[in-house]
Amino acid sequence: MDKIALPAAELWTKMILMFAIPNCDTVKKARKFLELNKIDYEFIDFKKSPPTKEQIKAWGDFAGELPINKKGMTYRKYKDLYEALSMSEQIDFIIANPSLIKRPVLIQNNNVIALGFNEEHYKELVRAH
């Protein structure tokens, strides 16, 4: 299936922040999509700048649950331990183990606009702006 670059959206005036891990394949796809569509963003590496408790909570509010990548190796490794923790302890555990976070997380104007990469959702974001 051919992928067509969408026109850059003029109203994306506020910088998008991408919270992620650079070597993640899903993140690589998201970065490629944004770059192909000439969408500027600032990349923030979870491992170098871990998210705060407030950020994790906000991302969880957007997702309807804490933003965990349940398909990832880190979650599978720590699933039993993680599931036994209280919500507050889970957040601390996520901060200490950022590989658990579903990624990338896109933020614009202090609001989560995407969690994970879904090409159709990203296309909708570009069209809407």
Image (cartoon, rainbow, N blue to C red):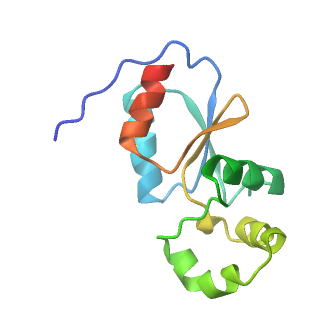
Q: x%, y% of residue 31?
A: 45, 42
Q: Which residue is drawn at the image coordinates 82% and 51% (left, top)?
A: 54
- In the depicted structure, whether residue 25 falls above or below residue 72: above
Q: x%, y% of residue 74?
A: 56, 76
Q: Nearer the viewer, residue 51 or 89?
A: 89
Q: Is residue 35 visible?
A: no
Q: Which residue is drawn at the image coordinates 42% and 21% (left, top)?
A: 127
Q: Is residue 46 visible?
A: yes
Give residue 66's quadrant in the image: bottom right
Q: Left or right of 125: which side holds 89?
A: right
Q: x%, y% of residue 44?
A: 65, 46
Q: Quadrant of the N terminus?
A: top left
Q: Which residue is drawn at the image coordinates 63% and 26% (left, top)?
A: 15
- In the depicted structure, whether residue 74 falls above or below residue 100: below
- In the depicted structure, whether residue 21 falls above or below residue 99: above
Q: Left or right of 109: which side holds 8?
A: left
Q: Which residue is drawn at the image coordinates 57% and 32% (left, top)?
A: 41
- In the depicted structure, whether residue 101 falls above or below residue 59: below
Give residue 32's quadrant in the image: top left
